[in-house]
Image (spheres, rainbow, N blue to C red):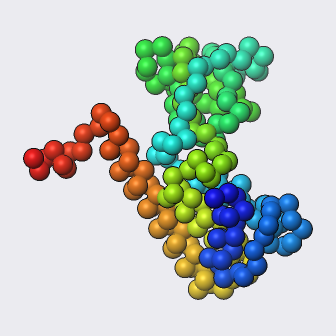
């Protein structure tokens, strides 16, 4: 499944019977999909709790960054970082940080930066995330395609349910990974 498939599913969800063949098509639907696809994708991928697109990188000092009063160190922010998760020192302790103009500032020396990556390829997403992005996009498209309030209300509900379902699945899968104990199953033994 790719972005065009997701856009066509979203158009169908909001009751639109036109399909697009690409995000660069000149049709009104393709123009709207091209505008709202990145917004819907980033909105869902920015939600806390995803593990599939979590990354860790070494903290690399940005010596050319402007000084920021109260913050002693400046680090490059990964170009693919969508949301910062945490900054850690060499001992693995969390550090206070702030981000200004794409630069990460800390008061103490950092070693590791954790972030959520903006994964643009839906083939790399869990199925629940695909459904959540599709539902988010359908809601956004429904608003600009002039759907009535009843349809929009249904799309908003579908958006909430798809996101909640994706998060439940992510939590379940994270708990089932090697080394993680299922407390419920253990209690039954």
Which quarter of the rendering shows the N terminus?
Answer: bottom right
Q: Is residue 121 above or below residue 14?
A: above
Please provide percent x and percent y for residue 15: 66, 82
Q: Is residue 74 above or below residue 182?
A: above
Classify residue 180 by image quadrant: top left
Residue 134: percent from left, percent from top: 61, 65
Q: Is residue 84 above or below residue 120?
A: above
Judge whether residue 129 can be spotted in this image. yes
Which residue lies at the image location 69% right of the left edge and 24% below the top edge? Answer: 76
Q: Nearer the viewer, residue 189 or 117?
A: 189
Instruction: Please indicate, yes or no, whether residue 100 appears anywhere in the rendered image.
Output: no
Residue depicted at x 55% and y 61%: 132
Q: Residue furthest right?
A: 26
Image position of 82 (left or right of 50): right
Q: Is residue 33 left or right of residue 47?
A: right
What's the residue at 46%, 46% (across, down)? 49
What is the x, y in percent for residue 138? Answer: 64, 70
Q: Position of residue 31 (x, y in %)?
A: 83, 66
For image coordinates 54% across by 21% down, the residue present is: 112
Judged left or right of residue 109, residue 51 is left
Q: Nearer the viewer, residue 114 or 186?
A: 186
């Amino acid at each position: 499944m790719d972005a065009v498939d997701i856009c066509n599913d979203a158009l169908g969800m909001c009751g639109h019977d036109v399909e697009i063949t690409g995000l660069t098509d000149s049709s009104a639907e393709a123009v709207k999909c091209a505008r709202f696809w990145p917004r819907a994708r980033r909105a869902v991928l920015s939600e806390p709790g995803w593990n599939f697109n979590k990354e860790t990188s070494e903290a690399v000092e940005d010596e050319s960054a402007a000084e920021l009063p109260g913050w002693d160190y400046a680090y490059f922010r990964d170009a693919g970082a969508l949301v910062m998760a945490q900054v850690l020192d060499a001992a693995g302790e969390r550090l206070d940080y702030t981000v200004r103009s794409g630069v990460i500032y800390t008061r103490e020396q950092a070693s590791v930066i954790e972030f959520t990556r903006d994964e643009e390829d839906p083939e790399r997403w869990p199925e629940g995330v695909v459904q959540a992005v599709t539902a988010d996009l359908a809601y956004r498209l429904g608003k600009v395609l002039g759907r009535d309030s009843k349809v929009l209300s249904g799309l908003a509900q579908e958006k909430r349910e798809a996101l909640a379902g994706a998060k439940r699945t992510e939590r379940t899968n994270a708990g089932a990974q090697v080394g993680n104990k299922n407390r419920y199953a253990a209690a039954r033994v």
